[in-house]
Image (tube, rainbow, N blue to C red):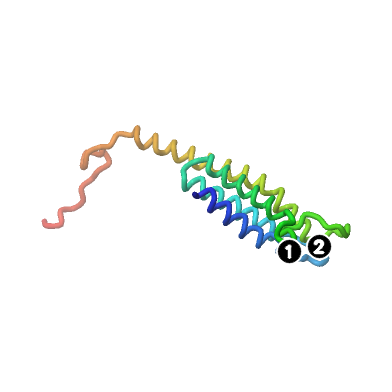
Amino acid sequence: MAVVLGALAAGILGTSLHAQVLYAGDTPLPLGAVGALVFSAAVAVFAGLWARSVAVSAATGVLTYVLLGAFSLDVFSGPLIVTGTSSGLDLAVVTAGLIWLFGQSLATVAAVLVTAVVLRREARFERAAAESPVLPYGTDPGYRPGPDPLG
């Protein structure tokens, strides 16, 4: 369930964000596409950590990529992700669409790596905590009783 909800959230919200372009003079900066990729990777990491599984993180990223592929088709009376035009013009929205569509694979790989590192560290910490002896109350060598409040 986390896979489907995460992929839907990343695909829909990222697609609505990806076409935001900031202009520095005449140079278009597709910051919306970059933000959408960061958001998509964060959603995949969240899903993987929620389920405590690297496979869930990967599945979320892959399903998001499949959803983006559907959004780039001409089935919604025009594609939601524009990856080319017949006019031959190099539009900023085309660049943003290409970054969003093909950058999703890199975002998925990054999310899987981050999830794997975090889960590995968590497992290492849990093993170390399970192996350390638990001392009964008051027997810790660093324990020093405080002043007697009654006397």
* Amino acid type, mark 1: Val
Image position of 144 with respect to 8: above or below: above
- Whole-angstrom CA distance, mark 1 to mark 2, is 10 Å
**Residue shown at the point (86%, 57%) measured from the top left:** 86
Q: Position of residue 4 (x, y in %)?
A: 54, 50
**Is residue 124 or residue 106 the one in the foreground?**
106
**Residue shown at the point (47%, 43%) measured from the top left:** 52
Q: Position of residue 78 (x, y in %)?
A: 75, 61
**Is residue 126 or residue 71 the one in the foreground?**
71
Among the 4 quarters of the image, the one containing residue 136: top left
Q: Secondary structure at mark 1?
A: loop
Q: Secondary structure at mark 2?
A: strand
Sequence-wise, which precedes: disc 1 or disc 2? Answer: 1
Q: Which mark is residue 21?
A: 1
The outermost residue toward the left is 151
The outermost residue toward the right is 88
- Label 1 Cα neighbours within 10 Å, binned few <14 / some 14-19 / many ≥20: some
Quadrant including the C terminus: bottom left
Image position of 135 with respect to 4: above or below: above
Q: Nearer the viewer, mark 1 or mark 2?
A: 1
**Residue shown at the point (47%, 48%) measured from the top left:** 50
Q: Position of residue 3 (x, y in %)?
A: 53, 48
Q: Which mark is residue 27?
A: 2
Q: Which mark is residue 134?
A: none
Q: Position of residue 74 (x, y in %)?
A: 74, 56
**Is residue 83 or residue 103 the one in the foreground?**
83
Image position of 135 with respect to 65: above or below: above
